[in-house]
Image (tube, coloured by chain):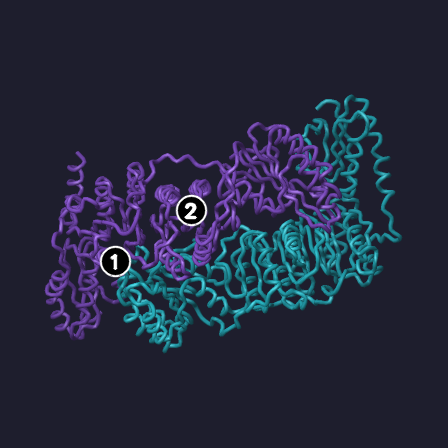
Chain colours: A purple, B cyan
Amino acid sequence: MKNLQAEVRPGAYYDSVVLMQLQKGLAALPGIIDAGVVMATDANKELLAAMGLLPDSVTAKADDLLIVVQGQNEQAAQAALAQVNVLLQQRQGRAAQAFRPKSLATAVAHLPTSQFTLISVPGRYAAAVAEDALNLNQHVFLYSDNVSLADEVRLKQLARAKGLLLMGPDCGTAVINGIGLGFANRVRRGRIGIVAAAGTGLQALTTEIHNLGGGISQAIGVGGRDLKEEVGGVTTWQALDLLQRDAETAVIVLVSKPPADQVAATLLRAAQSGPKPVIINFIGYAPPGRRLGNLFFTSGLVDAAEHAVRLSGEVVALVEKRRPLSGYLRGLFSGGTLAYEMLLGLQAVLAPLYSNIPIRPHQQLPDLMQSQGHTILDLGEDAFTQGRLHPMMDNDLRLRRLRQETADPDVDMIVLDVVLGEGAHPDPAVELAPVIAEAVRAGKRVVAIVVGTELDPQDLNSQIERLAAAGAHIFPNVSETLDYVYNRLPPPTRDFPPVSLAAFTGEGLTAVNVGLESFYESVIGQGGGAENARAVQVDWRPPAGGNEKLMAILAKMKSQ
Amino acid sequence: MKNLQAEVRPGAYYDSVVLMQLQKGLAALPGIIDAGVVMATDANKELLAAMGLLPDSVTAKADDLLIVVQGQNEQAAQAALAQVNVLLQQRQGRAAQAFRPKSLATAVAHLPTSQFTLISVPGRYAAAVAEDALNLNQHVFLYSDNVSLADEVRLKQLARAKGLLLMGPDCGTAVINGIGLGFANRVRRGRIGIVAAAGTGLQALTTEIHNLGGGISQAIGVGGRDLKEEVGGVTTWQALDLLQRDAETAVIVLVSKPPADQVAATLLRAAQSGPKPVIINFIGYAPPGRRLGNLFFTSGLVDAAEHAVRLSGEVVALVEKRRPLSGYLRGLFSGGTLAYEMLLGLQAVLAPLYSNIPIRPHQQLPDLMQSQGHTILDLGEDAFTQGRLHPMMDNDLRLRRLRQETADPDVDMIVLDVVLGEGAHPDPAVELAPVIAEAVRAGKRVVAIVVGTELDPQDLNSQIERLAAAGAHIFPNVSETLDYVYNRLPPPTRDFPPVSLAAFTGEGLTAVNVGLESFYESVIGQGGGAENARAVQVDWRPPAGGNEKLMAILAKMKSQ
């Protein structure tokens, strides 16, 4: 901590790019060892301290600009601080624009075709700017982080009601009509549409798709919290719906960290209800299978990109949607792992879901003797087999339960497994078929998963024939059974107006930028100065000079 | 509950098959509506009650046989109960065997080539029988459920020390030398070896493999709890090690519900250290990728079977193992999703592992300024970016941290991402390369994940060339980076004697069966009565007639 000199500028606001350049400029001056230029938040002061760049004497608040230099001697440090204004002026003299509106409203009036507003002001100012933009009927690309969850929820409800997308907050990237917003790799256009709650995840995915020879129709960022329970996947669902209607999009990819259960279920059912294949990459989520209905579950961004490129080049045969599930599904399994796989597959899309082998604690079936909601039972589980034979040998318990489920008017579908082989019942069909026939006569759909080979002692074909004759749909594994169920999922009710495709058509876009000037330069640059990427930079300053009290008063006046 | 008649036989023991047949026999008698024959455990009494088959007056304990019949009238019910002894004798007269030893020791003496003992006696007797079998140097197939976790741990430690496999408890199935044990489908032999903590999972997998045209070398069940923390994957590791040495096995499949983290890490490192591809299907586990090193992560049993059959038919090019990781890995990421993917990939195999974006709570890095153990940092996270530029634009923080990690003697490998594109730093290599070169000179291995396309403004090739010239290994995505790390994982230290391959060679086996007679009949039947499947059935009865007090005294006498 030798030869440190610091200067505090209370309430001074500069773009972070300016701060970085000031810091670099100071560090490059003669006799200077290191420099730090930051807004004096607690986190930043901690960082400075860790670098040995925080003099003990300094007191500065989050609103204040803190400039620290370490010189080889006292004089060099003082000389450097004296250069701060010169360095700041050098920067400010550079970028020039004919007209720099002071407010968002003026900017939009100046550029009336603008449909997007990019916002990268500091987090505590961002929500107010975003609200203004939505009220000016702009789709919002909200790069700013440190926006509260409550603000996010409020803004997204407003956007949804107005048929607008609020991409963000903390949305690092998007590619709209071929123009990258925020951080974005330059990639060819194509038939793959992306919705992503992950910033670099979206960049890595578009890059991988490009490098594999594929292309992007639209890539929509939604912010890292969109799929949390509180936010409810608002923007993701809007974007998914948009891409399902977009004629340029053949395949959709959905990327996120693992969503809240209920949010995942709604989005997957929305994805499944559409006419296009949807590739799911919930990073760190246990996939319920590889392909189920229209949905392709992948492991990792590379896997997702490979699938997307492959599918975008071929005609994918989607199963025609059939009569949707109109009641509960009840699974009566003799095989524990089959029950578990089934439960895993259903928990992604159905609720409420109960079991005696719950994956999540809230799925615990309270009374094993009585199913409720959708229920998956492992009848080979310890509680059912103490001192009695396993249900693979003894069908008694299962036959009784099958009759019980048949008698339940809320049940639509009953799923059974029939596991053949050595040691198992010599002829399960002879006992199961009559009771299955009763269920079918009572209007239930019955599915039998028959696990066996042609070498098994029970005669696989005869088992299948008799179960099918009783009216059961026969599948050889859980995977195909889940596919059957997914193709019969009831679609969720969409309770919001569709986002118009008008702003997401053709090449290029028109945008207003509030915040980091480099994002404005980037948009203009991608258009090559031509008409298809027009933008205006707002000369934004914190309201009331960043003074919190004054800001509160202004906000109150405005809302009256 | 009309016309119910019940009989309780205190302490009576019958094989569950006998109980099922008695129940069916009673239900088929004239004037009988329904019948229930069970050991009177609480669970079974609850089941009977749910079926309306439990008279209020009945008091019976878990040791007691409870027989209930419901007649069309009182007389029919009473007449049925009077038939119980006749029905029991009919059954017992059937199966006959020249010699029925009363004890396991006599059975093994009679069949000295026996290397496997199948045990399916009720759970509370099973541990003692299994211990006897291990002490007679038998591999144990323990079908019985309701065995305590403590007994399982004790038995598995004993088996491991003796170089024996304890398959189970609650092990439904295995296929050893082409002979199915317990419940097992008949499948062709082939080059795919399986280790499974899932009973029907193993059946479904072998069936799927067979139906796809593949075949099985050995399929080893380990019991559903083997991969829990308390048990530690003892049998799984032994079996994996066995299959890695088995010349007949070309591809290994490992199936389980999600294991405990530490158990998974050890087993995956053991799997990775071997010379064969290992297909992992942890059902309901978030896979860290598709292929990493020798490991192929799959989603669902069908996916696993398809992979196994495909790989068993081709020569898999495994990367030669390189200098293993000899210190900690530190990841300094600008991209949050890339950091998260990396963390997900590493948590499967490395511990202790810390992060500022932990997937599990115990991974939380206490001091963000100081890495510890293996650490993955997302430097674009809110705490690092308040009032300063994102690390994609401003390398300052990352360069400082890179120097800090270089100075740490416990660090072996440093991983960085370099995300190019619009909005990002115009030339990250110019700042990163010199500091990477310092790290390489200090003996660190540096990996750079360069995300970009040839259209990006930074010139992708020039970035890669300069980073490589500084000594960094370059990969285009997290997936290939994880593959690089997996090929350098230190193998876990195997602290147990290998299981001899002698019992797992050629066709057929010789076994002793204690418990369900149908398993004995099945083994004999699969050998077609020939020499390659020989078995002896033990005429087992509960010790001390099932009297708990007497059993305890006997056990005490035996241990002295």
Q: Secondary structure at mark 2?
A: loop
Q: Which mark is residue B264?
A: none
Distance between mark 1 and mark 2 Cα atoms? 34 Å
What chain does badge 2 belong to?
A
- Pick whichever of labels 1 and 2 is earlier in the sequence: 2
Whether residue B560 is visible here, answered yes or no, is no
Residue holding disc 1: A526
Task: Identify the image quadrant of residue A527.
Answer: bottom left
- Residue beneath the point at 18% across and 51% down: A536
Q: Are marks 1 and 2 on the same chain?
A: yes
Image quadrant for the C terminus of chain B? bottom right
Whether residue A17 is visible here, answered yes or no, is yes
Front residue (pair A193, A414): A193
User: Is residue A136 left or right of B324 when viewed as pictured?
Assistant: left
- Residue beneath the point at 13% across and 69% down: A80
Outermost residue, right direction? B98
Q: Is residue B286 above or below residue A245?
A: below
Q: Position of residue A291 (x, y in %)?
A: 52, 49
Front residue (pair A34, A348): A348
Task: Identify the image quadrant of residue B333.
Answer: bottom left
Q: Position of residue A314 (x, y in %)?
A: 47, 52
Q: Position of residue A452 (x, y in %)?
A: 68, 48
What chain does badge 1 belong to?
A
Residue holding disc 2: A259
Give the number of the mark in front: 1 or 2.
1
Q: Secondary structure at mark 1?
A: helix
